[in-house]
Amino acid sequence: MQYAPGREACPLPYAPFKACTVPRPIGWLSTISAKGVPNLAPFSQWQNLTFDPPMVMFAANQMSDGTRKHTVVNAEETGWFVWNMATYALREAVNISAMEVPEHVDEFERAGVTKEACIEAPCPRVAESPAHFECRYLSTHRLRGSSNHGTVDVVYGEVVRIHIRDEVLTPDGRLDIPKIKPIARLGYYDYTVVEKTFEMRIPEAHDALAGGLEGRGSR
């Protein structure tokens, strides 16, 4: 099976594109509007870019009517956004926060999660989440799609503060991922949860490369 997206009809009943790029980490992002309304929304097009300094990105498609996502507008207007780790225990709140609601709605309250103040960012973070990044907004790169909904804003930010709950760390100071159970996006309506990990080390990796992979010496 093969086809040319945008030029040929997909021969499958459901398009496979998103189901192939899996699993995708979830950018559960909190922001605050210029009017002071907290916003919370998940984005499955989220990734870290580099580690020195730590930088991240998320991509937000527009609404079908051409309206830009509140998260993008808020980040641009205030200069900040916060990543909250999405976990299996918080899956229902993550799903509720994906609903499209008017900009005056406090989505923390709607999702039933607790606001916790950040140190540098003006927006709150999700208190129940085990890890957070306070991100200073850098720029937006806009890519036009074949439709309003296909048009996307790619937003870049620098992580200026990291929060980790002590109870999710192992005795040697690593994140206990099977304990945290982060969730990730698959295709269609499907998600997955990380409950098992395994380690592979690059053969004959020099110390600088190993240090980068392990996070040794990072600020």
Image (cartoon, rainbow, N blue to C red):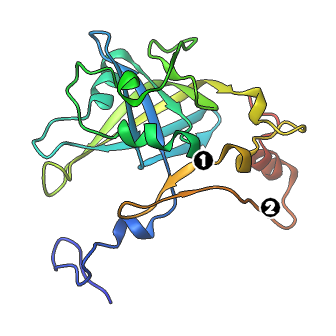
Q: Secondary structure at mark 2?
A: loop
3D distance between C-alphas at marks 2 and 1: 17 Å
Locate the N terminus and report the quarter of the image it occupies: bottom left
User: Could you tell me residue 16's position as x and y percent?
Assistant: 34, 73
Q: Give residue 199's mark.
A: 2
Q: Residue at position x 44%, y 32% from top?
A: 29
User: Does any portion of residue 57 appear in the rendered image?
Assistant: no
SS at mark 1 in the image: loop
The residue pinned by badge 1 equals: 182
Q: Is residue 95 above or below residue 139?
A: below
- Seen in the picture, residue 185 relative to 115 is either above or below; the reply is below
Whole-percent x, y for residue 85 in the image: 56, 37
Q: Which residue appears farthest toward the left when viewing the image?
A: 65
Query: Which of the pair 111/146 is nearer the observer?
Result: 111
Q: Position of residue 137 (x, y in %)?
A: 42, 25
Q: Picture quarter containing residue 32? A: top left
Residue type at the position of mark 2: Glu
